[in-house]
Image (cartoon, grey):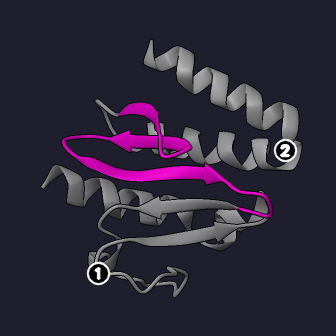
């Protein structure tokens, strides 16, 4: 059932925000390859990823895509790309597919995944 909801959300993004679909798909691929036993579910209007605990989610908004980290405030921000001022969450705003590499998404996903497994 969860897989069907994820696919339905991906289909909606593809059908209504083609430019976002490429970003969401690539981020999802990076997250799912970040380690074993990652689950995904549709929650809060995006795809939430969990290992031992939820650690990130990808969300398509009208003008951009965000990769949000549940415990992002605790992550080292080596590249200075984390946005947000809340007590816990931080996010990376993505406008193009090239932003994924330019903003070191894979590095931050790995850090968030390691923290979720600790």
Tell me where residue 33 appears, x and y as whole percent: 46, 38
Image-based side of 94 in relation to 40, left or right? right
> What main secondary structure does the magenta stretch of the protein show?
strand
Which residue lies under the disc numbered 2? 17
Quadrant in which the C terminus appears: bottom left
Residue 53 among those drawn in magenta: yes
As measured in the structure, the alpha-carbon distance from the residue carrying label 2 to the one carrying label 1 is 31 Å
Q: Residues within 10 Å of mark 1 (few under 14, many from 20)?
A: few
User: Looking at the image, which residue is at 86% across and 38% down?
Assistant: 16
Q: Hey, which quadrant is residue 87 in on the image? A: bottom left
Q: Residue furthest left?
A: 118
Answer with mark 2 or mark 1, whichever residue precedes in sequence: 2
Q: Secondary structure at mark 1?
A: loop
Q: Which disc is residue 54 wearing?
A: none
Q: Secondary structure at mark 2?
A: loop
Image-based side of 116 in relation to 113, left or right? left
Q: Which disc is residue 87 wearing?
A: 1
Tell me where residue 95 appears, x and y as whole percent: 77, 66
Q: Is residue 85 above or below residue 50?
A: below
Tell me where residue 31 appears, x and y as whole percent: 47, 45
User: Looking at the image, which residue is at 56% across and 41% down?
Assistant: 28
Image-based side of 73 in relation to 62, left or right? left
Image-based side of 73 in relation to 84, left or right? left
Q: Residue 25: in sight, yes or no?
A: yes
Quadrant in which the N terminus appears: top left
Q: Which residues are magenta?
A: 39-64
Tell me where residue 13 appears, x and y as whole percent: 76, 37
């Amino acid at each position: 059932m969860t897989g069907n909801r994820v696919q339905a959300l991906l289909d909606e993004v593809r059908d209504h925000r083609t430019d976002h679909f490429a970003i969401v798909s690539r981020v999802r691929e990076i997250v799912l390859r970040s380690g074993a036993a990652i689950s995904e579910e549709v929650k809060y209007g995006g795809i939430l990823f969990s290992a031992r605990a939820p650690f990130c989610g990808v969300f398509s908004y009208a003008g951009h895509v965000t990769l949000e980290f549940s415990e992002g405030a605790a992550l080292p921000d080596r590249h200075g790309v984390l946005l947000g001022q809340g007590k816990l969450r931080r996010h990376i705003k993505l406008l193009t597919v090239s932003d994924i590499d330019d903003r070191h998404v894979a590095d931050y996903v790995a850090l968030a995944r390691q923290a979720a497994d600790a």
